[in-house]
Image: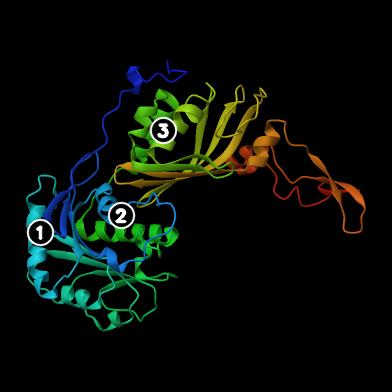
């Protein structure tokens, strides 16, 4: 039987530690980060990162999004990062050989005959040198640029360019354009960081890397189902959090409940979610879409509202009503652990089903006349029609009996 309250000493609250692999310093400007996944192995990538002095530092709170070294390690890659401090292009070949040798020395490198290179610096000269290299096991190149002079380059290997200016198509090159101020829009420590474009570019890069390196691939459905199992069946805070990356977040959009960062999210799960769900809670999945790094679930949240459900109807005392509320969860999975959950539902139908939302409200027209407005809000019937399109009628709210009532 699942616990009803939190007990940190219970067997269910004993979880395995998070993946840990210490960063190794290879040279003053070169570091090695083994994969930060439960699997612990993966293909190798080499990052070229800008000198911090080139970046305009971000003002305000630090974003939860980690810097590229940690992010790619959490995706399941073995990472060597080269910071371009007084970097001499003449040393490019030897630097790459040093990086590849360090990766090959890792027990956790599971693809040993090819590597990827990612350039985060707006440096066409460096990119051109990479294009011209021969005899190195580079399977693909990725780069972030504002410069338009990349259109004169001819890549020898499959290339992905993230650009802030449009150029004509290039041979052997995939190009994506972004409305961003600089190529540093993907770096969370930069003033130019743009979280929406950064997330989009990262997903595209992940697909590209997996294609040309042969992985890493994970069973996203199994990872999400495991997370839900620990949330709703085992009801364990520690085991739920063990399915998530170092710094995750959850946002229930309609009421803005959840937690940003491991400490806040752990407290939220402990105090306001896992033990606040009614005993009869049930998630009825209607559809599931699985992408490269996301799952989108369309489901119905069934409960008897016999207690205050903090994450869903915060501050609302129990009404005893049975609720069936359609929801959508967009779940971002990084490697073999969750990064974030964005969850939506129609709060109006939740309040209506709980008997807390009136069907009519006073309405004052533009000429000062007073009347009643019948609110266009559906009850449990919207859940029925989601399950079976023949179980309801479309457009009933468009017509007589709805809207302003004289």
C-alpha gap between disc 3 and disc 2: 22 Å
Which quadrant of the rendered structure holds the N terminus? top left
> Is label 2 in contact with label 1 (beta carbons under 8 Å)?
no
Which residue is painted at 46% across and 19% down in the image? Answer: 5
Mark 2 surroundings: few (<14), some (14-19) or many (≥20) residues within 10 A:
few
Residue 242 at x, y percent in the picture: 32, 33
Disc number at residue 67? 2
Judge whether residue 96 can be spotted in this image: yes
Sequence-wise first label, 3 or 1: 1
Residue at the spot of label 1 = 100
Sequence-wise first label, 3 or 2: 2
- Identify the element where label 2 is drawn: loop
Residue at the spot of label 3 = 266
C-alpha gap between disc 2 and disc 1: 21 Å
- Identify the element where label 3 is drawn: helix
Mark 3 surroundings: few (<14), some (14-19) or many (≥20) residues within 10 A:
many
Comparing 28 with 68, the one in front is 28
Residue 241 at x, y percent in the picture: 36, 33
Q: Is 62 on the left-hand or right-hand side of 104?
A: right
Residue 237 at x, y percent in the picture: 39, 28
How many marks are shown on the rendered structure? 3
């Amino acid at each position: 039987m699942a616990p009803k309250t939190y007990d940190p000493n219970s067997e269910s609250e004993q979880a395995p530690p998070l993946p840990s692999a210490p960063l190794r310093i290879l040279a003053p400007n070169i570091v090695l980060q083994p994969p930060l996944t439960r699997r612990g192995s993966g293909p190798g990538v080499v990052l070229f990162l800008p000198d911090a002095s080139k970046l305009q530092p971000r003002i305000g709170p630090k974003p939860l999004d980690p810097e590229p070294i940690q992010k790619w390690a959490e995706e399941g890659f073995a990472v060597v990062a080269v910071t371009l401090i007084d970097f001499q292009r003449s040393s490019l070949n030897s630097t790459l050989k040093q990086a590849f040798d360090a990766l090959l020395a890792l027990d956790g490198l599971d693809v040993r005959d090819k590597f990827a290179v990612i350039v985060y610096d707006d440096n066409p000269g460096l990119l051109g040198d990479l294009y011209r290299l021969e005899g190195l096991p580079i399977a693909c190149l990725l780069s972030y640029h504002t410069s338009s002079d990349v259109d004169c380059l001819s890549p020898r290997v499959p290339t992905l360019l993230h650009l802030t200016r449009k150029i004509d198509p290039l041979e052997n090159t995939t190009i994506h354009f972004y409305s961003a101020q600089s190529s540093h829009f993907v770096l969370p420590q930069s003033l130019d960081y743009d979280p929406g474009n950064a997330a989009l570019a990262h997903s595209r890069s992940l697909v590209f890397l997996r294609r040309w390196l042969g992985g890493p691939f994970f069973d996203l459905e199994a990872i999400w189902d495991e997370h839900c199992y620990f949330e709703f069946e085992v009801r364990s805070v520690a085991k739920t959090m063990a399915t998530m990356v170092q710094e995750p977040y959850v946002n229930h959009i309609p009421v803005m409940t959840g937690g940003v960062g491991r400490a806040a999210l752990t407290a939220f799960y402990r105090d306001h979610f896992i033990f606040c769900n009614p005993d009869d809670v049930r998630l009825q999945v209607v559809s599931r879409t699985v992408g490269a790094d996301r799952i989108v679930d369309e489901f119905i949240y069934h409960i008897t509202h016999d207690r205050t459900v903090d994450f869903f109807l915060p501050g609302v005392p129990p009404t005893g009503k049975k609720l069936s509320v359609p929801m959508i969860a967009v779940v971002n999975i990084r490697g073999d652990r969750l990064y974030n959950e964005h969850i939506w539902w129609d709060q109006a139908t939740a309040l209506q089903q709980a008997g807390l939302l009136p069907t009519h409200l006073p309405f004052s027209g533009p000429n000062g006349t007073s009347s009643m407005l019948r609110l266009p809000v559906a009850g449990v019937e919207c859940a029925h029609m989601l399950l079976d399109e023949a179980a309801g009628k479309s457009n009933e709210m468009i017509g007589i009996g709805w809207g302003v009532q004289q």
